[in-house]
Amino acid sequence: MTTPKTYSSIPRGFSAELVTVEGDTSKGLSSFNIVGLASRTIDESRERIRAAVRNSELYFPRDKLTINLAPASLQKSGNYLDLAIAVNVLALTGQLLTRDIANSMFVGELALDGHLRPVRGIINIAECATKHGFRKLYLPKQNAEQVRFLRLKNLSITPVDNLRELVLTLKGIVQSPAPEHLPKNNVVKNTHTDTAYAFLDQIIGQDQAKRALTVALAGHHNLLLYGPPGSGKTLLASCAPSLLPPPSREEAIAATKLHSLVEDRITMLNERPFRAPHHSASRAALIGDSSGLPGEISLAHTGVLYLDELPEFRRDLLEALRQPLESHTVTIARAKQRVSFPANFMLIATMNPCPCGYYGDDRHECKCNPTQRVNYLRRLSGPLLDRIDMTVRMPHTDSSVLVKNTTISTRQHASAKRQIAAAARRQQTRQDKLNGSLSSYETARYCPRTKEASLILEDAAKKLALSARSYFKLIKVARTIADLDNMPQIEATHVLEALQFRDIGPNLE
């Protein structure tokens, strides 16, 4: 007897694994067994599949039915394999022929009435189908938009609503729906309005901090804002989402691919991610886990990771950020599994100068003793601070300025947004990446500077005892400032402004 084979896939990290479904029937008591290192979720799918087949007016065998999921060494979990198993049962009983399911991959969760529910990680699965040479991918209708956005040339996407419709389509009785038209531009349109976010104009004063945020967003530089409570740190950070330029098509695919692993997302991300986890987050939630779920640092890929009250995070969590900040990837290795996720995010962090928040403030008396202040600042290690490109102190805004300010405008915000977009375009045209992602070799190649600027850099490196990493970060920040000024090379004024953002002050020494 010929054993029919159907194919599906399950996400694993930032990719997916091919799963071969094999079916066999034999005489004996009526039973339905699934073997091949299947999790409880897949084991429970037996009842969903049985009910879905019968409620679709199709025949389900009453013999001893065994389904094998290969390779047996791969741990399988999730709701991805329901449709492939059901199709295998139909092929096993002759309701579908081998030619009907040839060169096809099936994915989707079955409801008891036979309808298909969407699955997570569909982009990973579609890429796996293309990699292994499949010609057709049958999936739930809700997942179709994401896969069509990939524009895979050699893979035909067929969305289906229920199991009965799938059988009629495979038999040629019902024609597949025509693919929907997708825009051909290289940028994903942002359907959100900027009024959903804070504006720079809402922050009174703090001109240096606003400039720092503009520079940081334009060049993808890590930024630390510190100052007393109420100085506007959180409000300034909340302006970042509406200032960021829209993602390119490739960036939107990568970000959606990650978000669809943990969220029931059926559309493409049309704006850059802005993730703001609470300081009580666990290590797995922040970094990711080996089961295949990305953490906050990966969900912030191509966007911003915002950490409010930075010293309140556990020290081991902050130290775990050091490697992703440098390599822009995170690899989680366990005894039985190893997964990797991209993590090219921009870090924006805020903190107070001491536990009470008022050390160095001329308007409030600090209630912390020296030991408390030292212990508070020691929660941030030197290697972590060395990976932060820019640090800005935000003092209290004078009350007289607050009272006199009655202007309601978005002019400053709109101007900064235009500057950031123009500077980002110059960087992409010149080096195909933003300045913050340049390597030391690329920094020397793409960051020319005048003789006067080089002398200032050399003098600053000696006086401030900059590490090699800090030295190159200083150059990259200066290059971004030059891009904002539309200058072909780094001038002395650009280096001097970049040095203002490296002066972290006595409170953080």
Image: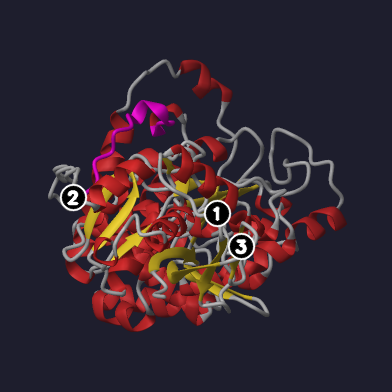
Residue 455, position in %: x, y? 35, 78
The quadrant in which residue 342 appears is bottom left
> Counting residues from the N terminus, which is met first, the one under dot 3 or under dot 1?
3
Q: Quadrant of the C terminus?
A: bottom right
Asked if residue 434 shows in the view, the reply is no
Name the secondary structure under disc 3. strand
Q: Amino acid at mark 2?
A: Gly
Query: Residue 172 — which label?
Result: 2
**Can you name the residue that lies furthest to the front here?**
27
Labels 3, 1: front one:
1
Q: Position of residue 72 (x, y in %)?
A: 56, 77
Q: Does 177 sit above or below residue 170?
A: above
Chief secondary structure of the magenta span? loop
User: Is residue 195 rendered to the left or right of residue 428?
Assistant: right
- Based on the picture, tell me whether residue 198 belongs to the magenta stretch: yes
Tell me the residue that label 3 is attached to.
33
Q: Which amino acid, by three-letter code, is at mark 3?
A: Asn
- The span picked out in magenta is 187-200
Q: Which residue is mark 1?
A: 62
Identify which residue is drawn at 46% across, 70% down.
Answer: 22
Q: In whole angstroms, how far apart are the C-alphas of marks 3 and 1?
A: 12 Å
Label 2: few (<14), some or many (≥20) within 10 Å? few
- Relative to 193, say whether 295 is above or below: below
Residue shown at 42% from the left, 60% from the top: 221
Q: Nearer the viewer, residue 331 or 94?
A: 94
Residue in the picture at 59% in, 70% down: 75
Q: Residue furthest bottom?
A: 441
